[in-house]
Amino acid sequence: MTVADRSLTLLRPMTHLRPAAALAFLLLATLACAPSEPDARSSSGSTQTPATLPAHGSQPGDESRDKTGGNGGAPTEPTDDATDGTGLPAEVRAAIDASLAELFGTFENPRYERLDSWGEIGFDPSIDAYSSAGAASSGDATAAREEFARSASTRWMTELEHVRRGDFQSVHLPEYALALLIEIHELGRKTPLAERDEALRGFVEAKIVDWYPTLAEARSIYHVHCESCHGAQGRGDGPTSFGHDPRPRDFTSGTFKFTSRVSRAKPTRADLLRTLSEGLAGTGMASYGGLSRAELEGAIDWVRWLALRAAVERELLATYEIDGEISEDAAHEAYASAWDAWLSAESRAVPVPTPTPTVTPERVARGRELFLDPKKGNCAQCHGESGRGDGPASYTLEPGGVKQSIVDDWGHPIRPRDLVEGKFRGGRKPEDVYRRIYAGINGTPMPALGDSKDANGAPLLSEDELWDLAFFALSLKP
């Protein structure tokens, strides 16, 4: 068989790939490349994007954008020698871009700069989600590893059957696992079928089950599953975003609506995993529960990278606006602060009492009283007396008596939840609704009643009253 014949054989199981990725694979096969080595992650978390991966979401000018890494990945196009076209001096823009590249790498070669403090808590963002401190979203590393393996065995069931038969060439993986796919196919090319013994088949099976995306591969997962709505830079401006109501989340704003944290804290990995796995009812955010746990955690890795990078850039721009300069240590201070906001979220959970109380007609009746009481829940002000989302605070009156929708933090029109419809985006279990009443919804006028105090500084609502409100809200759906 010629090299070209082998290349075509390798390519047949890859008909699901995008043309650019398939062409890249053909090129690698034609060159008879050596098997890919397992990812060797440096102490700085640096990863390398396989040379065959396309520049996802690229537009004219993206090549320079990824090299500079600045402005959330947007190209710098100065209109003169002094500014970058936005009034920011060109040398300041260049300094910010250089700092972002130092801390985060580029969109093509993303990484994280290590902080000394991470060693003290055993944290390393370049290690997968079920290792070290990253196991927080699943309890402990052992249980998480078992969960990852179960999910991978289900997701890649057909591929694992091929492997157990020794048919490595029929393994079919998504483009973001291209490096792994090449490695498996190369093993098949180099090893005659008769020599693909149980040990080798078990080795390849473990490769698939234990696969966890590098940060560059995480970017590719995001490109395949998330970019069309959330946009290449995570700004909620993808090509299909404008047909959605509500609009897709802008990750670069740093605000995430549905979390299990108090005081508007950042989400945990478990919060983001729940949204990816279950979707958000009544929105364009679908459930991605059919993906493996490793794929879901990879998407979370990239969303966090986008949010952290944007937070540091935002802080540096604010520093320059206030001080007229950016100190030598400003970037690293902003970087440490941004990471602290994410890591500290793990310790800021909404205190949901357990076990969940039993719902009774009396509790529902008390919940209705609190719902209508302007000095307690005051929920009817926005949700309306019947819970239809049509209360007097759900709109503003413009000249001429025209009703105008209230807006969220992104400036998009929103409407308070129609509780009768029963679509609770943060989950519809009693503890989910309790958590939402307690913590509010980030980026919206929905207040955090659990943090509210009365005139004497005492909690406005007791735990029992919060449960009563939750039970009443759930009772409104026929």
Image (tube, rainbow, N blue to C red):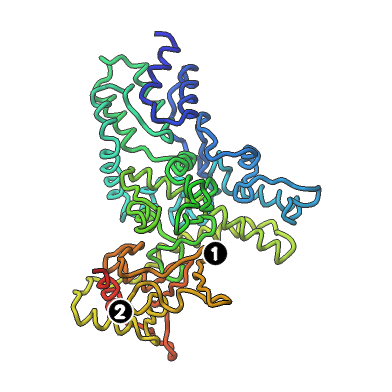
**What is the number of the mark on residue 411?**
1
Q: Which of 308 and 249 is in front in this view?
A: 249
Q: Residue furthest right?
A: 81
The amino acid marked with disc number 2 is: Glu
Mark 2 and mark 1 in contact (Cβ < 8 Å)? Answer: no
Q: Position of residue 109 (x, y in %)?
A: 55, 39
Q: Relative to 439, is 80 on the left or the right?
A: right
Specify the quadrant that holds the N terminus: top left
Give whichever of discs 1 and 2 has the lower sequence position. Answer: 1
Binning the other alpha carbons within 10 Å of mark 1 as few (below 14), some (14 to 19) or many (20 upward) gives few
Q: Relative to 397, is 140 on the left or the right?
A: left
Q: Position of residue 89 (x, y in %)?
A: 76, 54
**What is the number of the mark on residue 463?**
2
Which residue is drawn at the image coordinates 20% and 82% (left, top)? 362
Which residue is drawn at the image coordinates 39% and 34% (left, top)? 174
Q: Relative to 89, is 417 on the left or the right?
A: left
Which residue is drawn at the image coordinates 27% and 78% (left, top)? 468
